[in-house]
Amino acid sequence: MLWVLSLHIIFLTIWVAGAYYVPVVLSGAGRHENKFTDPPAGIDSMARFVYTHIATPAALISITAGSVVFWLNQTTEFWLIAKLTLVTVMAACQASMGLLIIRVERKEYGKVRALSYALIVLLSLLIAAILWMVLAKPSVPEGVPWTL
């Protein structure tokens, strides 16, 4: 089980690195257009390459390994369900990065920079909340009408 947890943590780290890299690259799109910043014909942009070949596969492996750990431990505590909810939002952020990449490739630069910065802030908050959930393992808060 330890090797699956290690796999989860390693690929989570790669996913987070890619998730930070893509919005940073996209935030600079459209500032200086010349023949050196545009990729050659038939070659994808660096943001698309990192998104499709590094960040997304790492996300899939990390989520799969985390699900295996969840299945092996047979844990259904409140903190884990809350963490999985946050991971779902993080996966939605990953999908929205793909939409930003498509916008930049179509040269629709309006609001890309603001959306990229918002994505970086949201990812930072999600990562901090997930780390807190994993390390603190909070119990069910008082006043919650349902229990797990």
Image (spheres, grey):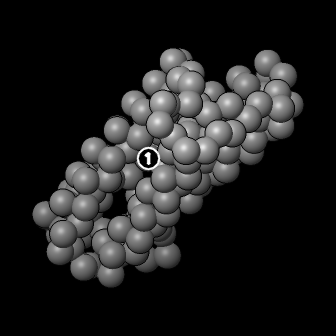
Q: Element under label 1? A: helix
Residue 85: in sight, yes or no? Answer: yes
**Drawn side of residue 122 relative to residue 12, left or right:** left
Between 97 and 84, the residue placed more toward the observer is 84
Q: Is residue 86 above or below residue 106?
A: above
24 up-or-down from 14: above or below: below
**Which residue is disc 1 drawn over?**
19
The residue depicted at 42 percent of the width and 64 percent of the height is 96
Q: Which of the image's four quarters has the C terminus?
A: top right
Q: Residue at x 56, y 38 (%)?
A: 83
Residue occupying the far left of the picture: 31
Q: Nearer the viewer, residue 14 or 133?
A: 133
Q: Position of residue 104 (x, y in %)?
A: 31, 72
* Amino acid bearing label 1: Ala
Identified at 50% across, 45% down, the residue is 86
Across and down, in percent, residue 110 comes to: 17, 74
Q: Quadrant of residue 111?
A: bottom left
The quadrant of the picture occupied by the N terminus is top right
Residue nearest the viewer, comparing 55 with 143? 143
Left or right of residue 38, residue 144 in this image: right
Give how far across and how far down residue 16 sits, in percent: 48, 39
Crowding at mark 1 (Cα within 10 Å: few <14, some 14-19, many 20+):
many
* Numbered circles on residues, count: 1
**Percent position of residue 58, x then y:** 62, 44
Residue 65 visible: no
